[in-house]
Structures are given as structure tokens and as C-alpha cells.
Image: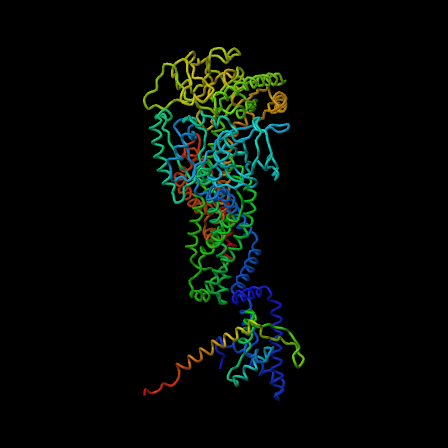
Amino acid sequence: MTRIRALLARLAGVFTKNRADAELTEELQAHLDMETAEYMRRGMAPDEARRRALLASGGLTQAVEAVRDQRGLPWLESVVADARYALRTLRRSPAFTAVVVLTLALGIGANTAIFSVVHGVLLKPLPNRDGDRLLYLRQSADGPGQANISFSVPEVDDLRTGVPSLGGIAEYSPWNLTLQGDNDAVRLDVGLVTGNYFDVMGLAPLLGRLTRPSDDGPGVPPVMVLTHDFWMKHFGGDRGIVGRQVKLDGQSVTIIGVLQPAPFFPDRIDALLNMVVSPHHVSAMMVQNRSHRMTEVVARLAPGATVEQARAEVAAVYARLQSDHQDAYDPGSHYRIAVTPFKEALGARARLTLWLLMAAAAFVMIISAANVANLTLMRGVRREHELVVRAALGAGVARLRRLLVVENLVLTLLAAVFGVVLALVGVRLLVSLAARYSPRAGEIRVDGVVLGFTLALSVALALLLSFIASLPREGSFASWISAGVRRMSGSLRRQRLQRGLVVAQVAVSVVLLAGAGLLTRTMMRLSEVDSGLRAEAVFAMDVPLLQLSGGPSGGTDPMAWFRHIMELDVAAKEQYERIRSEIRALPGVTEAGLGSSIPLAASTMTFDVKAEGQALAVGEAMPRADVRTASPEYFRASGIPLLQGREFTSTDRGGSGLVVIVNKTFADKFFPGEDPIGKRIAWTGPLLKVSPISGDWRTIVGVTGNTRDGGLDAEPRASVFMPFAQMLSIGGALVIRADSNAPGLVAAATRIVHRIAPAAPIVRVLTVAQIKDQSVSPRRLNAELVSSFGILALIIAAVGIAGVLAFSVSTRTTEIGIRMSLGADRAQVQRMILREGGVLLALGLVLGVAGAFFATGLVRGLLFGVAPRDPATFVGVALVMLAIGIVACWIPALRASRIDPAIAMRSA
Amino acid sequence: MDVQQGTLALMILRTLEVLGSLHGYGIARRIEETSKHRLTLNYGTLYPALLKLEQEGFVSTEWRQSDNNRRAKYYALTAAGKKQLARETREWRQTAELIAAFLAPRREAP
């Protein structure tokens, strides 16, 4: 207690110095006066009395010093003094300060911004209770679209009983529901969950309650938990929401609570409901069919269990499943299961991109730190005189080092402040980038951890900068003070360090530029990809009319629900056709078509497929194709070319013969070198039992060109189009081609949809250009970010080269003067300096290209249409670096050649 | 003779206990007199010690008119100071006894 009190008193003493000094002087003076008076009382003469009193005091100045040391915290005061001195020095060289602070601020800002994204998306603990014990289970198989096929209910049940190291397994089935408002309808992305879901996930309600096991099964009232985002967005954060009834797909559902903010995987969702809301989900079809996979699985490790244990046990159970149920696991497709920590699954898509950006930012930091180091070294030379004077006045090496540290701290902390401001701006941009890769983008903050990182970075930089400056060893000061040295020796060593830093800068810039070049080419290649659609004056609307939930619960008769849906479908088809024909009649519309989904969007349904008369080889993967539907006008409206055969006609209806149009990939796969027209194919596989699609033979009447439905960077998949009229209208999209101004027609088309189908939500309206852009824009942002880092690096490195050479010229002024007076001409001097810079440049280039050769392999996963060691990119980057480097060398070389020998030698 | 490290604080506290509140000069004179002028206190020793006691909360200070009408800073013992004095006195006694026992003339073996 006493110690803390004393420390606080001393701390206060640091700041109340002047007043305390005045008081002390008065107190000491009083003491002296009283003592003098005493001596006089004893009969001394006033002068003598005064002298004796002073003698006894032991010196007033010494007393003041002693009291001051006791009063404040001497070390703190000297640090404060150093800081004040540093600020004054820096103010005196504003150009140096500005360059250093700006350079460091760019580096620190870039790192702070990227780190805040890395921290928010990859590193920060999940908001879930014991989030690191959550696991995500993923089932996958060979073939396009099979990377994450989720689980069927029987599979989940087997895992639940067979894996003791998983303490809880929760089911989560992504689903869509239409929320009917008073005068609008909103399509919701929801998760249908089991009652244990929230307990397993470790999530708590913000308001109300969450679902629990008593909400499971058929025959319970449907209830809904809102996610935090949707509650804020749609209900404006209304705290009275709990207990409210809403209409979802025609059913009345009670909102029971609002969930704490939390990330979801694989997709963002609006709300979570119990399974009963969808009769299909509680039907025998869903619960008993092993191939009916539409359930995501999240599990929590049992107390004491490890991920490895869980992996081993899951693998054992899964092997047994595969041998027990061979019909559900086509051996040729290599079904497999992966157990990953939930946090890793959430970050999986973002990881490579973010570490790439972090590395790019770190490179920028290295280059800017190297630049500042060089500036500091050069400044150090000019300050040697000052340091010598300080040493002569009694400052030891440690004291001088501390002065440097404080000075550099002032610089880096100043830069950190600007850097954080830059980062705050940059983070906003980065959040939109991260949102494309991670469901955790909303968690990105410049928070305490991020600021701690920035502070640590700044302090580390300051220390680094302080310790590269070489100070003489303790005790050797005297020699150079006596020698009257103006320049500390060791300049050769120092120059070598400076040159080394320049080489490093060039090398790192080359690596960064190579990465930027590859990403830029990736982006360009991607936008050159032929989407498969002609012309861009096309827009598409997603208008799902069929509401799949609601209707009779399928408890007793599984087909009852289907029959109900079929009835709804007849009405929906009529509405679709009315909407289509009215939009077609709008002035400016040249064609309008209907289909199951908008073009260039992946189909949600993929089925096993077979061709008549073809047998699978043993071990060959079961072929699959995307299921799509199209009205007769769909291909013309989308601009998808018909390569062979005919389009659908209005006579391809329910009663007539079953026909299909396949895409080129499908035709090439099944009928290589043959004419596919007139051949017959059929859907097959265990999934057919749970679908409204029959396994009847269907005749191919046409072949279309491929479209890039899985994104521009994915190979086209095999697709089969069925006539819109011959298939249940799951999904439902309009494609509208205009003669010119497609976006201008959106409002008119939207009005028609609202008038004919007031209860239908319009999920999205996109022009084909926008759809394409969705696939290109994340890459573009990547390329732009890394390129701007690369350009930044290039500029800083160029300044670095020019600076070091300029410094070299200034130290060699006399030498150059002598050379010129001995007959060297301007060109020779220029060549001399250029050679000096050229060596550094060449060395940096060689190292940089070698480094890039290794580094670019790491970003292979982010590239498209360009090899990681693309020679054109490497050559281009080297040329750019060379050009900029030569310009940077030229400026000091020109200056050197303008040296007037007479002046140079006189000033020596 | 210079004052021994650590003992000055005790002397100051004791002086203030005996004489009540007192200024620096008074404290110095009293300590010198008590020591029969074997100790001399220069300012550089006394004032940092007083400041330290103040920082630790053992003495309080106040500017007042002195007897001969000049302004001076008066030091007085606080409650914490009284406790500290008692504790240090006890410790010093024990130490002194211990040292005395050690340094006692050796008795001849009987």
C-alpha cells in the first residue's frame, strides 16, 4: 500500500514540477534564514553568519537536485525529455519526418487493415460457447457439384449412435420460405433444425427462447428463431417481436426468439425453424431415404474427446455404412467424409486469399521499413557530430541508444496513428471483399487485439530502426572525441548495409509485382471467358411461385404432399405464362422465356442419369447431370445457341412424348462422335424415389452450347433441360431480352409480376453482365489489392534506390570533383553512378525472380487460366522493375554529373 | 559523522512525535542537539527524507507563520506515521538487543 501510494505521489510529482520547485526553494531559503538568524543571535556578523549557514547546508543546488530525484520518477522524466527532444529534432527536419511517417504509415495501415480481416475471419474465437470444440462434417463424392453433398437423415442417425466422441450431433437443413407481408413477400433463406441444434452450437437467445427437443417431429406447432442480422434488417430490431405470428408459405408460424449474432455455414441465413414447418422434412421420404441428402451436420466434441478420435470413429462408422448400403454409395464416385473444426470450415474459402493479402501487406511493410532504415542510416551520419557532443558531455552508449529508441518510437507511433486512420478506411472496402469468402465478415473490427498488433508492430519497428544504427562500443568515445571526428568510421560497413537493404527492396517488390501480375492476368482471363450467352441486353428475375412448405403433413400418406404440390403447380404455371406473355408484350422486349433458374446460375438439382443401350464400366463413376427446365423461348431469350436439333415447342406438354435438350458437355460425354438427336436418356438412382421426376425414357431433340453455370472459372457441367411445361416448377425464373435498354425495363417487368402474383417474392433481378461480374469481381478486388500493394512497393523501392544513390553521391562529392578535374567527363561520372545503382538493381532482380519462382506456386489455387510461373508475367514484371529502377538511378547520376569540380573541391 | 542509512526516517518521526509539528530547520536542530552534535544534517539529506515520508503518507505538511513571523513549511506526524514509528521503534529495539548480545564481552568459562 505504502509503496503504491509513494509511486503515485512520485508520478504526480512528474507533472507538478514547477510549483514544487518554487515551494522547495522557499522552504530551503527559510531554513537558511533561520539558521543565519541563529548564528547572528549567537553574536556573529551577518556576513559570517550567512557564510556559516551556507556551509552547513551542504549546497543548495545539490539539495534541490536530491529532492527532485526523490520527488518525481527520474527515468520517466528523462524519457519525457528525450521525447520532447525527439519531437523538436523531427520538427527541425520536416522533410525527413514526413517521408518516414508517410512511408511507415502506409505499411502499418496496410498491415493493420489486412490483419483486422484475418483476425475477424480466421483467428478470433467463435462467438459460440466453447466454439473450438465444434466440428463440421462434410460428405463429398467425385464429380462436379459433389464437393459438399451434405447428409441424409439415416446417415445422421448412424453417426449419432456410432460415434461416442461426438457429444452432440445437430441437423441443419437449408431451405427457402416465403414470408408474406401485408403488401410484399420476401424470400427467406432459412435453416430447418433439430431441437438440439442450439445446444450443440452453443448459442444463446438475445430475446425469447430457442428451439429445443420438444419442438422436434410432426404434430408440433411451427416456430421460428430470427438471426440477429435479419431481425435488425427486416424488423428494425423490434424488441416486441417475440410471440408474433407471421405467414410463411401460407402457414402461421410463431416467432419465439432472436438469436445472438453468430456466423453460419455454408450460407448466411435469415431464420431457423423446427422441421415441422416443411411437411417434406418430417415425411417418411426424408427420414428414411438414405440417398436423400439435404442435411448439414454440426457436432460438438464430447468432454475429453479429441478431433483425431472423432475422425477415426467417424471413418469407422462410415466404412461400415458403405458396405451395408451399397446402393446409396456408388463405389465409382468415391464417397468420403471429412471432419473439420467448425472454425476452419468457416474460414476455408477465405484462408488462401487472406494469407496472400497478409503476405503482400507484410512485404510492403518490409520494403517501407527498409526505406526508413536507409533514411535513418543516412541521417545517422549527419548526426554523428551531435552524438559526439552528447558523448563528450557524459552520455554513455546506453543513454544514446535510448535517445534513438525514443526518437524512433515517436516516429513509428506517429505513423501508427496515421496508419490506423488509413486502416479504418481500408477495412470498409475489405469487409465487402471478405463477405464474398466468409460468413464471418460481419465480425471484422479494428478492435483491441488489432490495435495491440499495430502497437506491437510499431514498437518492433522502432527497436529495429534503433539497433541497426551502429554506436561505438562503450569506452571508445574518448578516442573519437579527441580525434575531433566529424564522421564516425565504419561507413563502408554502413554502406554495405544500405545497399543490402536496397537489394532486398527490389527483390521483394519483384515478388509482389509477380503476384499482382498473375492475379491481374487471372482476372483478365476470367472476364474473357465466353459465358455461353450472346449479347448483354438480357436480364433475369428469380420468381419462385411454388411454395413447397405448408399443405398436408405427409405423416400417413407420403404422396399426399406431392399431390398438394402438383395442384399448386398447375396454378403457378398459369401465372408464369401470364407473366411471361405480358412482359413479352412490353415495348422494347424482344423475347421472354421461363426456366427453372436464371442462366449462369448453378442448378439446385443434380441427378444420376443413364443413356439407352450404354452400360457403365466397373468402377466408373455414376454420371450425373444438372436438372434444368426451359420454355420454348428460354434459349432464344438467354442467347444460348442451339447447336443441333430443335428448340422446345408449345406442343411439348404434359401429355405428349417426353423430350429433353442437352448441352454440349452432356452430348460429348454420352455420345462422343455420334449424333445425339433421337437418342434416349433417363434419370435414375435412389434419389428418384423422393423426387417428382419420373425415370421414364426421354428423347433428345436438341443440343445447346455450354454455359458457365458454376461460375466463369468452373468447367461447364453436363446439363439436361426438360420442357418447363413437363416438369414441376421448382424454382422459376424469367429471362428477358430487350432490344437495347435492359435495365430500363426492370421496373415495368417487376410491376407485372406484382400484379399477377402479389404473393410472389422477387428474389433477384440481374442483368447477364451483372451475373458475369459476380464471378469476376472477387478476383478483380484481389488483383486490385495486390496490385496496389505492388505499385506501392515499387514506388517505395524506387525512392529507396534513388535515396541511397543520392546519399552515395553526396558523400563522394569531393571524389567526383577530383575525378572531374583529372579529366573525367560528365558521361563518365554518370556511368559510374549508374553502374553503382545498376549492380544493386540487377542483384535485386535476380533474387526477386528466384523468390517469385518459389512464392507464386503457393497462390496456385487463386489463379485461373495462367500458370504460377507464367513466363510472360515474369518477364513483364522484370521489365517494369528494371525501367523504374533505371529512372530511379538516373536522377542521382544526373546530379553527380552536374557537380562543379571547383566548388566540390573548395568545400572539401 | 553522517547519518546512517535508514535511521534518519526514524529520527524524524520520533522528533515529530516528541515536539509536535515542526519545520525542517527545527527538525535538523533537534536531531543535531539530541545527537550532541555528533550528527550533521545537510539539506540534501534532510529534505529528500522528509519528502519521502510525505509521499509514503507518514507525515503531513502545512505552510504556517513561524514563531518569529516568517513563513515556513511545518511537518506533522499522521496516524499512519505514528503506527510506522511504533513498528520501527520495536524493530530497532530488537535489532539493537540482538547486536548488543552478540557484541557483549566474552565471559571466561567457569
- Would you place residue A526 above or below residue A3 in this image? above
Spot occupied by residue A451 in the image (x, y as percentages of width and height): 52, 49
> Residue most toward the right?
B69
Can residue A882 be spotted in the picture? Answer: no
- Would you place residue A731 above or below residue A863 in this image? above
Q: How many callouts does the rendering have?
A: 0
Q: How is the image coloured?
A: rainbow
Spot occupied by residue A63 in the image (x, y as percentages of width and height): 55, 74
- Would you place residue A531 above or below residue A520 in this image? above
Q: Quadrant of residue A87?
A: bottom right
Side of A243 where A164 appears, left or right: left
Can residue A504 be spotted in the picture? Answer: yes
Spot occupied by residue A301 in the image (x, y as percentages of width and height): 41, 41
Using the image as rendered, state which of residue A385 and residue B16 is in the foreground: B16
Spot occupied by residue A634 in the image (x, y as percentages of width and height): 53, 18
Using the image as rendered, state which of residue A621 and residue A361 is in the foreground: A621
Using the image as rendered, state which of residue A551 and residue A759 is in the foreground: A551
Q: Quadrant of residue A427?
A: top right
Q: Quadrant of residue A719?
A: top left
Side of A330 where A420 appears, left or right: right
